[in-house]
Image (tube, rainbow, N blue to C red):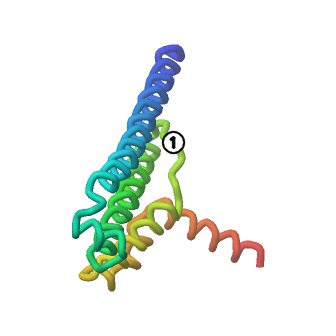
Amino acid sequence: MALSGTRHDHRSALKDLVYLLLAAGGVILLLFGTALLLDTYKNAPWMAELLSGGHTARTIAGSVLAVLGGAIIAGNWVFLVKRYRGQKAPSSIPLVGAVLLAIGLRNIAPLNPYFWVAILIDPATILMLTGFLRELFRRR
């Protein structure tokens, strides 16, 4: 029985590693695609506005940051649920997803007033902040 449990843990770790490598490959492809897009359309009028930092550029950059932050926060939720169910899960990433999502929402005009919600929906950030406050008041 112990061997099958050990094999399952190794398979789960291997599966998590494959997902991590696929995500890293996706990010690399996204960066290369962005570089290719910038090089291909460098004379297009919309690219000039994007590169000059106009309103559209802020919205696009905000959207990209919000999607990245949202993906990290979604991963944190998955890891939290896995741990709650008693399964092995990688450690979550506090602050990174919340900060990226908050910056992204801050740069999207209609969502600007709601940037602070990012801190509330990231479980890793909430757990980190509550742990920090607990330690802060425990020492006094």
Q: Residue at x 43, y 64 (%)?
A: 122
Kindly indicate the quadrant of the structure image that contains residue 118: bottom left
Q: Residue at x 35, y 65 (%)?
A: 66
Q: Amino acid at mark 1?
A: Pro
Q: Which residue is mark 1?
A: 90
Q: Position of residue 102 (x, y in %)?
A: 41, 73
* Relative to 91, 53 lies left or right: left
Q: Residue at x 41, y 29 (%)?
A: 15
User: Count the marks: how many?
Assistant: 1
From the image, which quarter does the C terminus lie in? bottom right
* Relative to 2, 40 lies left or right: left
Q: Position of residue 59 (x, y in %)?
A: 29, 73
Q: Nearer the viewer, residue 8 or 52?
A: 52
Kindly indicate the quadrant of the structure image that contains residue 69: bottom left
Q: Residue furthest bottom?
A: 113
Q: Residue furthest right?
A: 140
Q: Relative to residue 106, is residue 27 depicted above or below?
A: above
Determine the secondary structure under disc 1: loop
Q: Nearer the viewer, residue 58 or 73?
A: 58
Q: Residue at x 35, y 69 (%)?
A: 51
Q: Residues within 10 Å of mark 1 (few under 14, many from 20)?
A: some
Q: Position of residue 9 (x, y in %)?
A: 49, 26
